[in-house]
Amino acid sequence: MLRKPIGVVLILLLLGACSKEVISHFATFEKPADFPEPVYHFASNEITEEKFELGRKLFYEPRLSRDNTISCASCHIQSSGFTQHGHDVSHGIDDRLGSRNSPPVMNLAWSPTYFWDGGVFDLDLQPIAPILNVVEMDEKLENVLNKLRAHPDYPGLFKKAFGTDEISSDRFLKALSQYMLMLVSDQSKYDSVMRKQGPSFTDDEAAGYTLFIQNCSSCHKEPLFTDYSFRNNGIGIGANNDKGRYLVTLNELDLYKFKVPSLRNLSYTSPYMHDGRFISLEAVLEQYALHVQATPNLDNALQQNGKLGISLNSTEQKQIISFLKTLNDKNFITNKRFAEP
Amino acid sequence: MKKYFLLCLAIASLTACQKDDAPTPDSNVKAALSVEFDNIVGGQNLVLNTGTYTNSFAESYSVSELRYYVSNFKLTNTSGVTYTVPQDSSYFLIVESDETKHEAELLVPQGDYSSISFTVGVDSLRSTMDLSKRTGVLDPAGDMETSMYWGWNSGYIFFKMEGISAAAPLDNSGQHKFRYHIGGFGGYSAPTINNIKTVTLDLTAGGVPKVRTGREANIHLMVDVAKVLDGNTPVSIAAHPSVMFSDFSVTIANNYSSMFRHDHTEN
């Protein structure tokens, strides 16, 4: 008597489990509850598993470059927080040198502009720049599409993702966007502390956090640790006289301004600044405390009360660094989901 | 040239006769209208590479590359009613080296048109639209020869003219080359240069196009690229061998906005 209903229940449970597994198999983009609303236009590029996986394959695809040697991942390495760790400026095709440090591919759904100078305003348009750049991939977009069309796998993968095997700029770039959008870093110790998930700051980290709020957070705004503005932070004009944001706006008031970078994953992304001139966080903190230079358009926050820089003694600098290290997200740099397929 | 003109006159008078017998055109029916961009230099036809021309600074030059976007066509008929060509079919890239790319092919209501207006370049709205709305000539992949798109500072190159002149300094490629790549739609996240130009031309003096089903009226425009250097502000190649995304690009854009004139219409 009892046997039958149990069997039915079991079958129902199994069915439920199966259908549930199918639904939850692919974890799509999800805004962390304590993050602001993303700015990317998901409505015109809804994340799907097939498009994400195609985008990931394309991110690791050297055919994007003229001689099939350089992929996106050449300068954006997962274990380095998706930067080119150890290089002041990025190394591209034929070992040509760029003029800026590769920024991390991380939390891009919240970024209103891309690149240190903000010259690109839509993530879908971003990959065009490194592909065309003669010191990065030195290739033509049409050529890339032709190489993918001729490849044994890609037409099928585009069909799986988009319904037909047509390989267009739109599809190619949107698939790449899907992968990059999924690169969300929000699993640092800082995040766990803020979410009251158990861990707590050490005394140094807590002191550093307080100092950070007082001295740094107006530009490095929580929880993304940037306000995405462009500022001259007083590191002095670089050897190559990179004019930064000015190149995009031609506005004198933007001379020598660069985008405020996020501070997440700093332990994996050395060196620092737009030209990678500082190799340690100690050097960065010392720069802000002691060496800020009065160059055109120096940010107001760095010249308060007639004094250049931020008043921080060496203990305070160390405490801030302790706090900054709580922004490392080990899960982000080891997550197999983001690795080369 | 003269022969051609006479032929046009003959055709014009023929169609004029036809019109007398024809009923009033139905503006609810659309018909073909083409706009030809005939690139010239002063009083000469533009011949790529081999033609040599001289600007007002007595600098001699040849042209190796000429291409520009024309878009957002509007036509006003003789009753003063303006028809705006639907945006999705209103973008054209004129390419001097490709004879199949000298015309904008439009579909407009039947009628007689007294003026035409178009944008030289790509409007800011389209410049910032989702990629799925940027196909055909607006595809950033462009063609293989030369890109009309800036990747590092998102936006289209509206006008590109390159050539050789002894007045230009020797460049890395070993040539005395001048390069004018003009763009700038006004900026997305911050205001910047806006080189979008709107050109409006009267069509009554050169011949009103009569758009009717079953034939294709052709508005023949002369595009005098000498104006790029000798427009409102004379430009010396020696002083400005390379103009791309810079404040001076505004001068070049102002110059080329005056290079279009209506020559005649074939009905």
Image: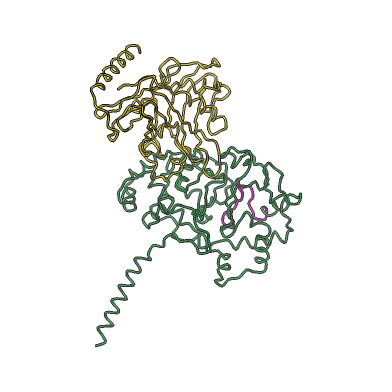
**Depth order, front residue of A48/A282:** A48
* Chain B shade in the render: yellow
Choose top left, top right, bottom left or bottom right for residue B72: top left
Tell me residue A305's x, y (percent): 76, 51
Residue located farthest toward the right when viewing the structure as drawn:
A306
Quadrant into which the C terminus of chain B falls: top left
Choose top left, top right, bottom left or bottom right for residue A226: bottom right
Quadrant into which the N terminus of chain B falls: top left
Q: Is residue B114 above or below residue A89?
A: above
**Depth order, front residue of B104/A280:** B104
**Residue drawn 47% across the image and 26% down it:** B161
Q: Is residue B220 above or below residue A226?
A: above
Q: Is residue A190 above or below residue B56?
A: below
Tell me residue A131's x, y (percent): 46, 42
Query: Which segment is the magenta one?
Result: A267-283
**Depth order, front residue of B108/A33:** B108
Q: Is residue A115 above or below residue A264?
A: above
| Relative side of B221 to A273, left or right | left
**Residue drawn 27% across the image and 20% down it:** B15
Q: Is residue A2 magenta?
A: no
Residue located farthest toward the bottom when viewing the structure as drawn:
A1
Tell me residue A191's x, y (percent): 56, 65
Q: Which chain is green?
A: A
Q: Is residue A278 magenta?
A: yes
Tell me residue A229's x, y (percent): 59, 49
| Relative side of B260 to A270, left or right | left
**Depth order, front residue of A260/A338:** A260
Q: Main secondary structure of the magenta part?
A: loop
